[in-house]
Amino acid sequence: MTDPRDVLSPAISAAIGRALGPEHEGADPVLRPSQYADVQANAALALAKRVGTSPREVAARVVAELDDLPATVEISGPGFLNITFDDVWVASLLGGLAADPRLGVPTQEAQVVPIDYSAPNVAKEMHVGHLRTTVVGDALARTLEHLGHRVVRQNHIGDWGTPFGMLIEHLLAVGEGSEEALLLESDPNAFYQAARAEFDGDEDFATRSRARVVALQAGDQETLRLWAELVELSRHYFNRIYSTLGVTLTDDDLAGESTYNADLAGICDELEAKGLATVSDGALCVFLEGHTGREGKPVPLIIRKSDGGYGYATTDLATIRHRVERLGADRCLYVIGAPQALHLEMVWETARLAGWLPDDVEVVHVKIGNVLGEDRKILRTRSGAPLRLMALLEEAQANARREVDSTRPELAEEVRAAIAPVVGIGAVKYADLSVAHDSEYVFDLDRMLAFTGNTGPYLQYAAARIHSIFRSAGVVPSHAAPIVLGEPAERALALQLLRFGTVVAEVGDTLEPHRLCTYLFDLAQDFSAFYEHCPVLRAATPQLRESRLSLAGLTLAVLVQGLDLLGIETPEQM
Ligand code: ARG
């Protein structure tokens, strides 16, 4: 615990109890940032109403009971407490932070947390929605792991279903290993579209495709081999995107729809036996209370279609059962599109009724909002042509390269070539992370790549600038020297640094990476203000120089660690 407010809060709560009676103990002191002090406590107004005196009187009684706080407390306005921490105390907390390899981030009691994210579809292009779940899911995985949890990544790829008949027949038509087949690795939509065209235009092909689906479901060996070939080629495509993005997903995390094939019949049987599912119009359905559509008609969760096939809902019932029973989940995250909220609600409710999802297992839909084009419609195409994610990522890197070439022409060619992908990809990822994950936003490469504002490049630049201070000093970055605090800008930076652990823990609780982005952005701005007002290399005394270098080094460590939790790299120069 290094955030001084974490010490302050319980101290004030206890004082409130002593001043106003035990029934008020534990009252929230309502801490707010203040321009007149480090923090302001605003509880007196609400408490005054309850105890029937004036807020100022309440404030005075609470202050009288506050003992031994390493801070000065002043009553202001109608009854606020303006609290300014003692410099020496803040400096000693900062010393503790600097000596802590975890930089104040707590280690929480370990939970098993399966995270369902990314989940692209075989033989289809990943779209920007997949990009967003991949980036947000990966940041959550990294953060929860860092907080001490056992994260189990689950990449629920779409690798099963009726289109596979058509896709397999197309693979045979173009020839395994042919150039057209290899499109699956580079431009999967082109492969899919060609298969579709053949299906729509050629009656024989369509008939063969339908027969293929039957053979696939019946487990025909040769058909399964061809199917596996399609999945394998798509896997290469996914992995190329993942390595370009620097996400932590590996082949070991693949748990596609097909992995649950053997469970689906049993799931249906069990729901039927438990009286939860009934046949309606030939389909096996679960009807849940409160889920009604137009004219009050109940909306079913279809778990077996009238043709005997299983669908998306059935496999998702299998995912929850698997994650609870086999993986031992304490908390399950589904990082998937916001429009799928109803689907998940119905699946979870069914699982609860079936006894597959115990009350003490938490399930969370981390809702991913739509990514829009400049026309504010869902971003699907660019200038008419289908949107290719790889092309988009390449464009981001090329733009970053142009920017670095023009701002840092003096850097060696290899150095600029290495910086460009870090900045380009960092920009795209940060844009996904810095807005609330459930909000919509407009995809705008120019804005993402801007060096000013709340962007990835701005934060990377802040870190690179600290590296350059150390380069000028001729030493490697460190934060070992004792830090003394005098100037207001130094204190502000110190207090911000002390909040890091609290913010990371908050991201783990709320599953909102944008809070960490906001924090890092504030930190970078506090550093800028510090650097502007407090000379570092030309500080008045050698001790002060060391202290300020240490403060810069600690800021760098927090920036690098924070960005790393978001899955963003920091270049040493840019
Ligand atoms: N493959 C699906 C899609 O592209 C997403 C799957 C999300 N995960 C899940 N367990 N339903 O929309």
Image (cartoon, rainbow, N blue to C red):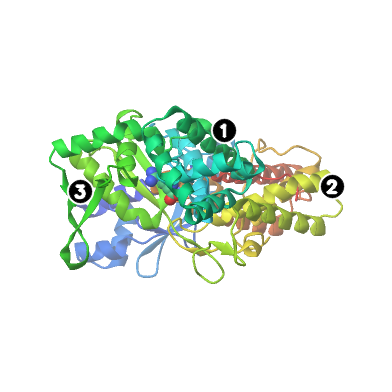
* Amino acid carrying mark 2 in the image: Glu
* Amino acid carrying mark 1 in the image: Pro
Dot 2: within a 10 Å radius of its alpha carbon, few (fewer than 14), some, or many (20 or more) residues?
few
Give coordinates of residue 552: x percent, y percent: 67, 46
Res 458 seen here: yes
Q: Is mark 3 within 8 Å of ligand 1?
A: no
Look at mark 3 in the image and give the residue it sits on.
282
Give coordinates of residue 563: x percent, y percent: 59, 46
Look at mark 1 in the image and give the residue it sits on.
101
> Above or below — where is 257 with respect to 538?
above
Which mark is nearer the camera, 1 or 2?
Answer: 2
The residue lying toward the viewer, choosing from 249 and 427, is 249
The quadrant the N terminus occupies is top left
Res 67 seen here: no
Residue that lies at the very extreme toward the left in this rendered image: 275
Give coordinates of residue 401: x percent, y percent: 76, 54
Dot 3: within a 10 Å radius of its alpha carbon, few (fewer than 14), some, or many (20 or more) residues?
few
Which mark is nearer the camera, 3 or 2?
Answer: 3
> Above or below — where is 101 with respect to 305?
above
Left or right: residue 477 compared with residue 11 = right
Q: How far apart are marks 1 and 3 (CA)?
A: 61 Å
Look at mark 2 in the image and give the residue it sits on.
413
Give coordinates of residue 379: x percent, y percent: 53, 63
Sequence order check: which comes first, mark 3 or mark 2?
3
* Amino acid carrying mark 3 in the image: Gly
Element class at badge 1: loop
Q: How far apart are marks 1 and 2 (CA)?
A: 35 Å
The residue lying toward the viewer, choosing from 4 and 397, is 397
Going 36% across and 29% down the picture, which residue do you hit? 327
Instruction: Check whether the beta carbons of the residues at disc 1 and disc 2 lie within 8 A of each other.
Output: no
Going 48% across and 33% down the picture, which residue do you hit? 253
